Each structure stands twice: as C-alpha cells, then as structure tokens.
C-alpha cells in the first residue's frame, strides 16, 4: 500500500495502464505506476475499499466493515469485579497464631 509523499505534487496519469488515474495526497493506493514509485512511500493505514480497484455491493461493504472492525484492538479498559480478583485480594488469609517454623 502506498501514499503520495508530502513533498511530491499530485498528478494525473495521461498514458499507459494507469491512464486517467488521479494520484492525490491523503489517499492510499494498492499499486502505483512503476515509473512513479519515487513519488510514493509505504502507507501507514489500510486503504479505503474504493481504492482497491474492485466494486463491492452494499452488503459486501457491510461485511468487510464488520470484519475489519472486529480485527481492531479494543481500547476499552475492563474493570475487575470482586469475582475476577485473585483470592489473595478478595479474602486475605489472617495469621491465627502459632509457630511459623
């Protein structure tokens, strides 16, 4: 996956297999013209579905979104309930006297 470098100008391809394709800042591309690879850098994000060069139905897009959202790590912090705490925390053992030898 590639993005246009910040210092590279945006451009439109006028010939070859990429004829008519527009390359813009902030977009992610699965493939770039071989002669123009110097204008691009490795992308840090996943591409939008529309930039994969495949048309999907709304049902397929919804399924893809569901799958990719499920792959994202959750940032929600889970709070420990009393049942989840180790026994040493919920019911500390009291010393009942005697020798510890």
Image: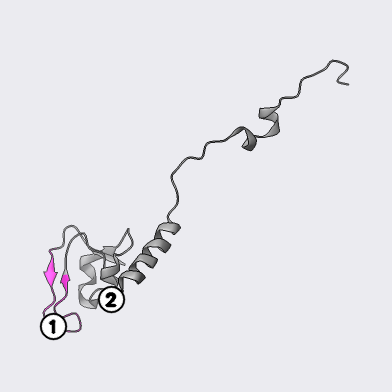
Q: Quadrant of the C terminus?
A: top right
Of residues 24 and 90, the one nearer the viewer is: 90
**Based on the displayed image, in which of its 4 quarters is residue 49 positioned?**
bottom left
Q: Quadrant of the N terminus?
A: bottom left
14 is within the stretch colored magenta: yes
Instruction: Classify 58 as above or below 75.
Output: below
Instruction: Classify 2 as above or below 18.
Output: above
Where in the figure is residue 79, as x and y percent of width and height?
52, 36
The residue identified by callout 2 is: 55
| Magenta-colored span | 9-22
Relative to 54, 23 lies left or right: left
**Based on the displayed image, in which of its 4 quarters is residue 11 positioned?**
bottom left
**Based on the displayed image, in which of its 4 quarters is residue 40 positioned?**
bottom left
The residue identified by callout 1 is: 15
Count residues near mark 2 (Cα–Cα under 10 Å), then give few for <14, some for 14-19, many for 20+: few
Residue projecting furthest to the front? 59
Q: Earlier in the sequence, mark 1 or mark 2?
A: 1
Of residues 66 and 39, the one nearer the viewer is: 66
Where in the figure is residue 18, as x and y percent of width and height?
19, 79
């Amino acid at each position: 996956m590639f993005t246009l470098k910040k210092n590279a100008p945006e451009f439109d391809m006028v010939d070859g297999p990429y004829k008519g394709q527009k390359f813009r800042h902030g977009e992610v591309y699965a493939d770039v013209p071989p002669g123009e690879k110097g204008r691009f850098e490795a992308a840090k994000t996943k591409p939008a579905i529309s930039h994969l060069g495949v048309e999907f139905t709304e049902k397929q897009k919804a399924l893809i979104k569901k799958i990719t959202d499920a792959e994202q790590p959750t940032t929600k912090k889970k709070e420990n309930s009393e049942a989840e705490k180790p026994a040493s925390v919920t019911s500390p053992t009291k010393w009942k006297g005697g020798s510890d030898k």
